[in-house]
Image (spheres, rainbow, N blue to C red):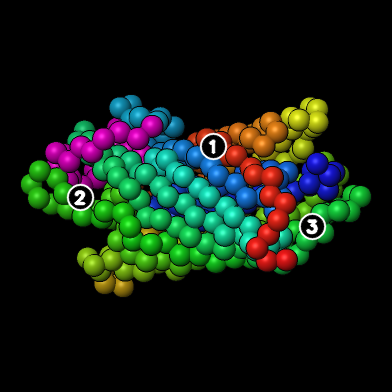
């Protein structure tokens, strides 16, 4: 593999990867995976876990008592109650995804994600879990700037856009026949669109990645929606080549997410407003064409509100990268 690929970074950006919830996603669905396989099509499995636990002034638990890391079955017998400051309250959002990326040319990539979501909410000791197929996402990126063959400084700029389709079920109800809120559903019931960019600056074996996304959310049949959102990432990494076949890439990450929260009939309700800064570390291991990804983040700062506070997120993934030699578009 040529040395210029040492400086490459792949940012898979998707707003609402966890289609059930703007706030369940990896910073609205963005996942950073650093890879030397630039312009290579790939197939991935990814599992994401995101938790909110306790209220302002209380302890936040990364893994709240009674929660599970992997998806669990549906539990629709819990009553719907109001938050009253119970320190055991939590929200946990999980997504297990199949992802595919295909390069039409050296500058054009197509992406698709199929998620299976499992969302749990405990309020005043009452636990409910809704699981099922989530909303499928498709998006395309264009490599506007590519200077990855320089001796020292390398650059890349990707711009793109995509759509989230309402393929997930969004009307799960409890035993009394009351529908759970939109954020707890496996799907949102709305069609959403987004745009993004990712800029990479590499110097020898070190690199810096900056990205921003903006998402426009549609409205479901219950006239519910999420306010338009923006997210930004900063990722600093270093490429360690253990040998010709194995590469190790540790990284330090910062992520900021903002949304005005839930809306009903186009009017903001003040529920689930997001204004958070997350920080953490990542580790990517490359063995031939196989990539293993891991990232852990915790809350660095969060605006005060009356809902459970952000606690943390974990991302685990495995990717197979094809040795793509030819493209449909030259």
- Which one is earlier in the sequence, the residue at label 3 or at label 2? 3
Query: Along the horizontal axis of the image, is 117 left or right of 9?
Result: left
Q: Which numbered dot is residue 172?
A: 2
Q: Residue furthest left?
A: 176
**Residue 206 horizontal/vertical position (percent):** 80, 43
Residue on which disc 1 sits: 317
Residue on which disc 3 sits: 155
Vertical comparison of 44 with 212: above or below: above
Disc 3 + disc 2, Cβ < 8 Å: no
> What kind of element bears circle 2?
loop
Tell me the quarter of the image containing the N terminus. top right
**Residue 126 horizontal/vertical position (percent):** 19, 36
Magenta residue check for 186:
no
Tell me the quarter of the image containing the C terminus. bottom right
Nearest to the observer: residue 244 or residue 21: 244
What residue range appears in magenta?
70-93
């Amino acid at each position: 593999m040529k040395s210029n690929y040492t400086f490459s970074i792949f940012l898979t950006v998707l707003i609402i990867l966890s289609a059930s919830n703007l706030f369940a996603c990896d910073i609205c669905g963005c996942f950073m995976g650093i890879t030397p396989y630039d312009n290579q099509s790939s197939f991935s499995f990814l599992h994401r876990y995101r938790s909110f636990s306790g209220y302002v002034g209380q302890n936040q638990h990364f893994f709240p008592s009674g929660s599970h890391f992997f998806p669990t079955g549906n539990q629709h017998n819990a009553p719907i109650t109001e938050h009253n400051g119970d320190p055991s309250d939590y929200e946990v959002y999980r997504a297990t995804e199949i992802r595919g990326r295909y390069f039409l040319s050296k500058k054009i990539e197509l992406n698709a994600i199929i998620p299976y979501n499992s969302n749990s909410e405990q309020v005043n000791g009452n636990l409910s879990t809704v699981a099922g197929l989530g909303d499928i996402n498709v998006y395309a990126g264009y490599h506007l700037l590519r200077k990855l063959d320089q001796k020292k400084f390398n650059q890349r700029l990707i711009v793109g856009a995509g759509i989230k389709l309402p393929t997930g079920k969004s009307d799960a109800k409890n035993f009394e026949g009351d529908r759970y809120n939109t954020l707890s559903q496996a799907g949102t019931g709305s069609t959403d669109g987004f745009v993004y960019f990712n800029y990479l600056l590499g110097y020898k074996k070190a690199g810096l990645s900056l990205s921003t996304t903006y998402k426009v959310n549609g409205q479901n049949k219950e006239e519910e929606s999420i306010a338009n959102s923006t997210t930004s990432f900063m990722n600093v990494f270093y490429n360690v080549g253990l040998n010709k076949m194995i590469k190790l890439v540790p990284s330090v990450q910062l992520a900021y997410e903002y949304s005005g929260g839930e809306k009903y009939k186009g009017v903001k309700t003040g529920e689930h407003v997001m204004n958070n800064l997350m920080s953490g570390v990542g580790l990517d291991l490359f063995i031939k064409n196989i990539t293993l990804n891991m990232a852990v983040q915790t809350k660095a700062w969060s605006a005060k509100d009356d809902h459970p506070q952000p606690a943390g997120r974990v991302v685990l993934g495995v990717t197979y990268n094809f040795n793509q030699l030819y493209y449909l578009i030259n």
